Image (cartoon, rainbow, N blue to C red):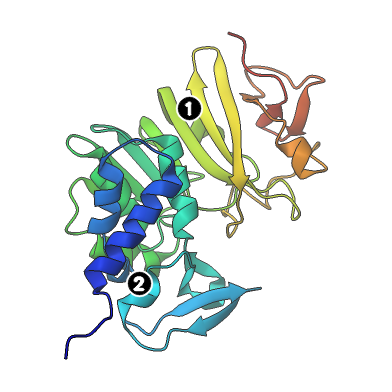
Amino acid sequence: MKSNRASLEEIRGFFAKRMAAVSKSRDPRLERIFELVPREAFLGPGPWQVWVRDRNYLETPSADPVYLYENSLVALDGAKGINNGEPFLHAAWIGAVSPQRGEMITHIGAGTGYYTAILSLLALPGGRVTAFELDAQLAERARHNLRPFESVEVVNADATRASLTASDIVYVSAGVSAPPVGWLKALKPGGRLIFPWRPSEEIGLTLLVRAEATGFSVEPLAPSWFIPCIGASREIVASTTPKTQAEARSIRSLWTTETKAPDDTAIAVYPDVWFSSEPPET
């Protein structure tokens, strides 16, 4: 008797369609690449721990990969609160930064490499991805998982202190209070930096930064909440921070303090960088 259940391939294909739709991208490659990269290959053997709320997890009923093709966080290290990130959020981020063939991409907070793999396929041919992961065990898992993917290097290091190569995209999968100046200087003209901004415990917001001719423009996107990025989060003391999500969403530019002193448009001020409600000069 023929089963009425959809196959894993059909389920993965529908997941890819939803991911492509959420990305709001016109890039025809996205759906196929979302379908080609199997999420289960980056999560270890099942059953898996799926995040519910307040760092509580439920175990999937079995090791059947169909349970992974939902918009859910899956534990990589539940004790540390490290998860494989929410698929629809990352699909939207990927659509926003719009990776192109031949681009150089730096992925900070690569985990076990699932989204690194997707970024690497979008950069082919000719592009490269350098993936930073601070946790040594996760970095080793990422190296293993990413062996089949061309032009990917996994670095077990603190990306807030490392010298980044010139990048078209810096993609940050960890909560940041203030991006290190080195990340901004690594952006090529027209380069994009995307990261989850955490100026306070109450505010979490994705920021898309572009390297313009006259400075760094900022586009606030959807809310986002990530585990803090060590070296770029709680260790940095701000003299000014936004009081509400609405104030945070008013940001339009980002400056280094060495190039421009904070003025009365400042929304958040840190030792090395500050955010302004005014766009860069055109």
Which of the pair 66/81 is nearer the observer? Answer: 66
Q: Is residue 276 left or right of residue 224?
A: right
Nearest to viewer (mark 2 / mark 1): 2
Residue 247, position as x, y percentages in the image: 78, 36
Q: Which mark is residue 43?
A: 2
Residue behind mark 1: 185
Give the quarter of the figure containing the N terminus: bottom left
Q: Secondary structure at mark 2?
A: loop
Identify the residue at the far top of this view. 282
Mark 2 and mark 1: Cα distance apart in space: 33 Å
Label 2 Cα neighbours within 10 Å, binned few <14 / some 14-19 / many ≥20: many
Which of the pair 128/270 is nearer the observer? Answer: 128
Check the image and report above or below for 112 versus 240: below
Which of the pair 252/239 is nearer the observer? Answer: 252
Check the image and report above or below for 40 versus 90: below
Q: Disc 2, disc 1: CB below 8 Å?
A: no
